[in-house]
Amino acid sequence: MDELSRIFLALADPTRRALLAQLQRGEATVTELAAPHSISVPSVSRHLKVLEQAGLITKSKSAQWRNCRLQPAPLQKVEEWMRPYRDFLSTRLDRLDAQLAINPDRPDAFTELEDR
Amino acid sequence: MDELSRIFLALADPTRRALLAQLQRGEATVTELAAPHSISVPSVSRHLKVLEQAGLITKSKSAQWRNCRLQPAPLQKVEEWMRPYRDFLSTRLDRLDAQLAINPDRPDAFTELEDR
DNA sequence: CTTGTATTTACGTTGATGCGTAATTAGGCT
DNA sequence: AGCCTAATTACGCATCAACGTAAATACAAG
């Protein structure tokens, strides 16, 4: 399992994305994070483990509490992976818009023209 | 299954990301997309179905061929989802303010935020 | 040392995922 | 019609993901 797959898989769950959203407000313990959810605390703990193994969060222990904190690196990796697509799709859309202004009946006649 | 989960789940597979990378070069049929991979054509067809249901590609049929093409909307949705995280993680002062708003009585709870 | 709290791990179940092979649908061609 | 190619769907199988309950671990305080 490569790193990007771990990151995307971690993000592919609404509960885990909600946990990340909670952590935007600052650090939080496991029970604090579990409170707004209807699922059990062990389930939240497992979700946090997935997020941790994806590098999206880190846990620092003080006594029996684990303070969870957001980490920026994985999301930066996602940005890097997306960059060529954003460049490609933006230029492609621009050219498609231009083509639609000229030939509104054949928007797909433009596809093979693009080589990068 | 919400839309973002479908998108992230579709991206959480190396084969599917490789298929998207191939489509950066333009349209391609199913067999063309399957050629560089060691898996079977039906498996690639199923992967493409996942990508299609996530909105990442569309298929236009001409005769018995399906021309697959990249679609920008889902990746833009991912960008939108990531934006608040990028803003949050970029500046340390924001984190400090957020932490003070949540835990005004425990100023030492965010001392770890100052490293890095 | 015992109790209470926070968290993780174990266990069993359920549903989803990924794969290859085989069968099926669909279109073009002679 | 018959045949060939492209693509999807059906089937069986193995693996993995998510959940709750229950047990286990870790730590602080009485």
Image (spheres, coloured by chain):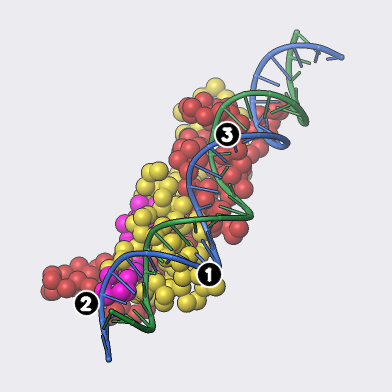
Chain colours: A red, B yellow, C blue, D green
Do the residues marked 3 and 2 share a common chain?
A: yes
* Residue C17 position (above or below residue A45): below
**Residue B96 visible in the picture:** no
Q: Residue B42 in magenta? A: no
Which residue was labeled with disc 3? A43
**Quadrant containing the C terminus of chain A in the rendered view:** bottom left
**Quadrant containing the N terminus of chain A in the rendered view:** bottom right
Q: Please, which chain is the residue tagged with disc 3 on?
A: A
Which residue was labeled with disc 1? B39
Q: Please, which chain is the residue tagged with disc 1 on?
A: B
Q: Residue B68 in magenta? A: yes
Binning the other alpha carbons within 10 Å of mark 3 as few (below 14), some (14 to 19) or many (20 upward) gives few
Between marks 1 and 3 in the image, the one whose residue lies nearer the viewer: 1
Amino acid type shown at disc 3: Ser
In-front residue for pair A47/B92? A47
Binning the other alpha carbons within 10 Å of mark 1 as few (below 14), some (14 to 19) or many (20 upward) gives few
Which residue was labeled with disc 2? A109
* Residue B61 position (above or below residue C10): below
Do the residues marked 2 and 1 share a common chain?
A: no
Q: Upstream in the sequence, badge 3 or badge 2? A: 3
Residue at coordinates 48% horizontally, 35% vertically from top-left?
A22
* Residue D3 position (above or below residue B38): below
Between marks 2 and 1 in the image, the one whose residue lies nearer the viewer: 1
* Residue A21 position (above or below residue A99): above
